[in-house]
Amino acid sequence: MDAAEQSLVDRIWAAIEAKDWKTALSALEDGVSVTPESLYLFELYADTLLDELQDMEAGCLMLRRFVRLAIEKDSKAWLLGAMYQLFDSSRDYSRFPFGERLSMGKELSEHILTLCQREDAHSRAEYYDAMAHFFHEIGKNEVAVELVEMAVTLVKGLPVQDEVKQPLLAQLLKTLAEYKCHEAVRAEL
């Protein structure tokens, strides 16, 4: 970050910590307008609307803007950031319009699938993991399991040190176990 962006981020965090939401939102809006290339500011803005303020209407508009920019930028970081904003298992989406999330997730997934074909193994694994959360969420668990299995295979084949590979594998295997368990429970019903 340059000095101006760091100053803005400091102001935003001061407002958030003081729970001065009017100032925080104003600074966030200024930030994303002045610095539209800042993924961090877009993520912070979405987090503030969805998690802190639980403003699903404004959050939905913000995420629609985020998704559009991610696709326009055709950037791995932006695409993954947008996908995780929409399908983060630690966030409560119960008040968020499911159809909107589905539409945005579908749009991102279609773009990512096209992009994946020209990416390296590590990037494809990250994309598959992100898309798996979307497919699991919409009830296509068998697709989610396949995507995570492909990600596991790709990560296992990465020519990187174990201290880099093992945490990735551990997270993927945990997700895979959760999805397979979910699939087994559904099969029993």
Image (cartoon, rainbow, N blue to C red):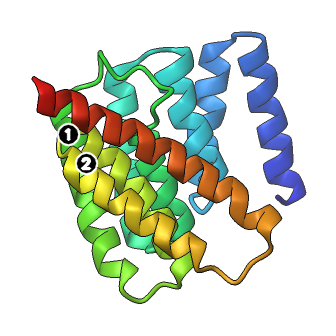
Residue at 51% of width from left, 64% of height from top? 126
Where disc 1 sits, the SS reads loop
Q: Are marks 1 and 2 in contact (CB under 8 Å)?
A: yes
- Three-letter amino acid code at disc 2? Phe
| Foreground of the two, 47 or 9 | 47
Q: What percent of the width, then of the height, locates residue 113?
A: 29, 73
| Foreground of the two, 88 or 187 | 187
**Classed neighbour count for the residue bearing mark 1: other residues with Cα under 10 Å, few (<14), some (14–19), many (≥20):** some
Q: Is residue 106 above or below residue 185?
A: below
Q: Is residue 142 above or below residue 138?
A: below
Residue at 29% of width from left, 23% of height from top? 96
Relative to 142, is 117 on the left or the right?
right
Q: Farthest residue toward the top?
A: 19
Residue 16 lies in quadrant: top right
For residue 138, the mark is: 1
Q: What percent of the width, then of the height, locates residue 167?
A: 70, 54
| Quadrant of the snapshot with the C terminus | top left
Q: What percent of the width, then of the height, locates residue 158?
A: 63, 79
**Classed neighbour count for the residue bearing mark 2: other residues with Cα under 10 Å, few (<14), some (14–19), many (≥20):** many
| Foreground of the two, 26 or 127 | 127
Q: Which residue is mark 2?
A: 135
- Three-letter amino acid code at disc 1? Ile
Residue at 60% of width from left, 29% of height from top? 26
